[in-house]
Amino acid sequence: MGSAYEVNAAGGRSAVRSCARPAGGDGGGGEGEGAPRRQPARETAARTYARALPVVPVRARGLTIEDADGRRYLDCASGAGSLALGHNHPVVLEAIRRVLDSGAPLQVTGLTTPVEDAFVTELLRTLPPGLADHARVRFCGPGGTDPVATAVALVRAATGRTRVVTLTGAHHAADATACCPADAGEPPAGVLLEPVRCEDGVLPVPDPWLRDLRRITAEGSVPLIADETETGVGRTGAFWAVEHSGVTPDVLVLSRAIGGSLPLAAVVHRADLDGGHAAGPEAAAFRGNQLALAAGAATLAHVREHRLAAHAAALGDRILSRLRVLAEEFACVGAVRGRGLMIGMELTAPGGGCEAPGRGGRSDTPSELAAAVQRECLRRGLIVDLAGPARNVVRLLPPLIVTEEQTSAVLERLADAVQAVERGPGDHHGPPHRRREAR
C-alpha cells in the first residue's frame, strides 16, 4: 500500500509512516495485522465490504481512522451514513458514560425509562411541524428490514388493506398518478419511497414530483411512508430529506444515524394510524437499548443545536461544484449528484470502455473503474464506498462535523485518485486523459 496522508495544521497533507506497535490486546500490530488474512476463512463471502477496504481500524476520532499499522485515513463512508458526528464524538461518549455510571439497566424491553423519554422528547423536536404535533413513536429491532416491516404492518393494520407500493427509479420518470394505482377499485395500504435512493447510486427524488405524490396520496387516503434510514439527521442538508420538498409524510422510517453510532431504529407516524393491533417485528428484544437511546438523543440535540444540517448543505454544494469540474476534466467521470453530504460520482466508460491513450488501449467497465478509484483513494488515505446496481458510483458520506480543511483534503485525494485511474497502470507521469483542456 502506498503512503497514507493526514491533514496537518496548515491545511496541507503529510505522509504518515507505518510505526511499530506492540502485539497483544491493545488493538495495535500483532493480531490486528493478521485480521484481513484470517477473515476469508472465517466469514461468509456475502460480506464484501471489509474485503474491498482492507483496513483494520484500532482508533478513530471524528473523520479520522487509524489502522493497526499506524496509517491514518479520512473516513467518507461513515458507517454507511450512521456516524452523523463521526467517530467517538465527545457528546456521544459522555452520554454513554452517564448511562454506564448511573447503574441503570442497559437493556429494557417494553418499559419506559428516563433515557427513552429523553430520546423521544428530542426526536419530536426535530420533526416537521405537521407531523410533530400529532406523532407517535414506535421502536423496533435495529435490523436492516425491521423498521420497514414495522411501517408496512402499521399501514396495513390502519387501512385494512394489504398491498403496499414501493417506488423505484422507474416510477420517478412517470406521472405521480401512476404510482398510486387502485387494484380492483381499492387503493393501496401505503406508498413507500426513499427521498434519496442512496444505495441505488445517490438518486434524489425530484421535489415537484414528490409534492404531486403527496397530494395524490392525501386525496386517496393512502399513507405516505418516507424511508429516512440513510437520509435522516441532517445528512442531506435538511434534518429530514422530505423537508426539501415541503412534504409531510404520514410515516417516517428511521435508523442508522438516530442511534448516534449504535444500533437503533424507530417508526414515527401520525397518531390516527395507531390502531394498536399491528404487532409486526417491533416486538424485537433489542428495541430498548439504553446506550443507543442515550447516544441518539445526544446526537439529535447536537445536530439541531449546532445547525449541522445547514453546514452539510454548504459543504455539500462545495463538493458537488468541485466534482462537476472533475466531470469536465476526466473522461471516466460521468454524472455527479447528491444532496448535502450524500454525494455520488458516477464512473462511466465511453463507448463501453475507457480506452484512453494513457491506458494503453485497455478497456475497463464502469464498475472496474469505480473499484480502481476506490483503491487509489485508499492508497491516498481516503475511505469511500461504492453504490449503484453496477457498483460504479463512488459515494461520499462524510460526517456532518467535517471541516473546510478536511473537505479540501478529501477533494484533493479524490482528484488525485481519479487522475491516477485515468492515466492507468504503467503511466504515472504522463498527462491524464481529459475531455478537454482544464481551464
Image (tube, rainbow, N blue to C red):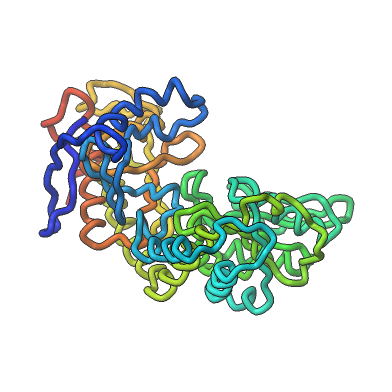
Residue 256: % across, % down: 51, 54
User: In the visual, does 60 lie left or right of 159?
Assistant: left
**Residue 367 lies in what quarter of the image?**
top left
**Taking 58 as reference, is 422 above or below it?**
above
Q: How many marks?
A: 0
The residue nearer to you, when weighing 256 against 32, is: 32
- For this orientation, the residue located farthest to the front is 103
Q: Quadrant location of residue 381? A: top left
379, 390: nearer the viewer:
379
Q: For the point 33% across and 23% down, which residue is it? A: 363
Tell me if 154 is positioned left or right of 305 in this view: right
x and y percent of residue 306 in the render? 37, 74
Residue for point 22% across, 35% down: 69
Q: Residue furthest right?
A: 184
Q: Is residue 79 left or right of residue 414?
A: right
Q: Could you tell me which quadrant the N terminus lies in?
A: top left
Instruction: From the viewer's perspective, tell me whether residue 271 is left or right of residue 160.
Output: left
Camera-side residue of 341 and 100: 100
The picture places residue 4, in percent across and down from the top left corner, at 19, 40
**Viewer can see residue 382:** yes
Residue at screen point 81% across, 65% down: 275
| Residue 173 in view (yes/no) | no
Q: Report which quarter residue 92 is drawn in.
A: bottom left
- Comparing 400 with 356, the one in front is 400
